[in-house]
Image (cartoon, helix red, strand yellow):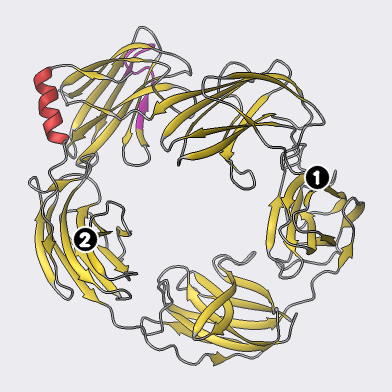
Amino acid sequence: MKPSLLAAAGALALIWSVSPALAQEAASLRIGATVDGALGDGDARDTDGDYVYDDYRFAARAGQRLEAVLRSDSFDAYLALYAEGSDEALAEDDDGLGEGTDARLRFTPEEDGTYVLRARTLSGTDGGGYSLSLRERPAPARAPRPARIRLGAEEAGELTDRDPQQEDGGSYDAYSFRAEQGQRVIITLNSDDFDPLVRVGRMAGGDFVELAHNDDGPDQGLNSRLVFTAPTAGDYVIRATAVQDGTGAYTIGLAPAPDAPPAKPLVIGDKVEGELNADTGANDDGQRAQLYRFSAEAGQRVAIELSSKDFDTYLVLRNGVDGSVIAQDDDGAGVGTNSRLTATLDTAGDYVVEARAFSGDGEGRFTLTVSEVAPPPPPTPIQFGDTVEGEIKTEDPQSDGGKHYHAYAFSGAEGERIQAILRSGDFDAYLEVGAAEGDFTALASDDDGLAQGTDSRLNFTLPETGDYVIRVMPLSAEEDGLYALELTERGPEPEPGSILVGATARGTLSSTDAMTEEGAYYDAYRFQAKKDEKLRITLVSNAFDAFLDLGEGGEAFTSLATDDDGLSDTHAKLEWTAPEDGWYVVRARALAPNETGAYALAVERQP
């Protein structure tokens, strides 16, 4: 139930204090200029009152390389860029200048037009003075001819701000080498000054086309190690760069890579026995692996299972031409540490299965099965408010994890909250929800969310308008039996109410309120506090065991402090000091799932 605020005069004052200011006229800003300004009470606020801002309009050309810098000693600076007339940010930055809390935003407009640069606080309405500059960045230096590196060599180099820049930012040095078709090489990049990132590709019309990259090689810490197989004969380019805008000394090496373990042939439908031991060849990451190659038709769907009593199994399915990973799995078989994956193969050709242990030194006997599976049947339509009954049987389709399931399709709108409840007396219930388009990928799941035995309750906010699928299944692949599924629509997420320091709010928790991941209902209230302000927050209810959760708002709630029985056995009390000026959110909630009823929430200054 939407919370209500007592004291009409206090409520009116609060509504006035958090209402967003009318959109102010954006000042003009010339590229190449610097302006001084100040953020304060008279400036515009966002619709939630979380920050204050000044807007600046400027005209820019498509492809113009621009940089805006916002500096302030009074607040944590934040920059955002918008196309004029749009409220969707094209680019944003918090601490990009790398000098404390100042912001630097680099961007290149894709088309001619008028843009709006927003100078704002990261959070909070207490601003202060600032300096904002907008300049055109010079064209990137023409990339020098890559230095030649020979096979077996190791070269020393240094990344500096004077080096050429990548399209997405960051300095790089380039090296070239020649390789024959199918030749395998190891590229290493080590540095104590920055987090290395190695990229390899080819040049096409002056553009670098990446073919592979590596950030952190196996057992290399932050250093990079990439095993690369040349798809065709010719010249290749290595870019030595940093994960972020790092600079400093490095060493780069190019060495022959050992041959990949030979792939044993099999056909779909085979069941083979194998073994990992000290004589087993290693994959590109240096792990023991047995490889198997099979052929498939376009659109063919396969299930691959790997089981062992000796080690924790791990499966990888790769494209047989370029070695790219299509799917991988650790414990998807649902039984102990065995693996299972299912994939629909897009193209006709060869595919490679890599059978290995989860840890690199695992060894022992294993069994590998590759079988064809039918495509999943179309889901059954279900409407909000429906309750359907069914029975999971061994002939039903299986998920990638080997669990038999039934699928139900529904449509919903962005921001809509849905609730699915699955009950069964025969198996431990499990629910998944995902988008209807393409191969099913779970966006959310639940095991025992109903908090009443092994039944499931899944609450999910739809990320966009469209069609979705709910999968009903047992938690274990070996289970089956009867079930009942309920689907309800809970409306949009309730907006937080507001409460003044010194006021008391009375409300009622109900089944339509927001819900935590643990299934506890709550009402949320926003309030404003000053740095070092000492507050006492109490929650009293005779209907449920009260629980307080205090945190920062924003897109995702971040808890700062909680209390269960600080006032008495079932009433909560928090004594808390605000760490910074700003807006905070307190959740008045029940300790346990499914509890509802009336409450009183008070926020007051400590005496």
Residue 75, compared with residue 407, is above or below; it is: below
Q: Nearer the viewer, residue 252 or 206?
A: 206
Q: Nearer the viewer, residue 458 or 216?
A: 458
Q: Residues within 10 Å of mark 1 (few under 14, many from 20)?
A: some
Quarter of the figure that contains the C terminus: top left
Query: Alpha carbon of mark 2 to alpha carbon of mark 1: how far?
Result: 54 Å
Q: Quadrant of residue 468?
A: top right
- Sequence-wise, the earlier of marks 2 and 1 is 2
The question of residue 31 being in magenta is answered with no
Residue holding disc 2: 116
Q: Which mark is residue 456?
A: none
Q: Which residues are magenta?
A: 561-572
Q: Residues within 10 Å of mark 2 (few under 14, many from 20)?
A: many
Q: Quadrant of residue 283?
A: bottom right
Q: Position of residue 587 (x, y in %)?
A: 33, 26
Residue occupying the far top of the picture = 542
Residue 70, compared with residue 420, is above or below; it is: below
Badge 1 element: loop
Q: Position of residue 513 (x, y in %)?
A: 39, 22
| Residue 119 in sight from this viewpoint | yes
580 vs 297, left or right, is left
| Residue 153 in sight from this viewpoint | no
Secondary structure mainly formed by the magenta segment: loop
Mark 2: which amino acid? Val
| Residue name at image x 13 percent, y 58 percent | 26
| Residue name at image x 13 percent, y 42 percent | 21
Mark 1: which amino acid? Val
456 vs 358, left or right, is left
| Residue name at image x 29 percent, y 29 percent | 496
Q: Which mark is residue 373?
A: 1
| Residue name at image x 40 percent, y 20 percent | 512
Q: Position of residue 571 (x, y in %)?
A: 34, 14
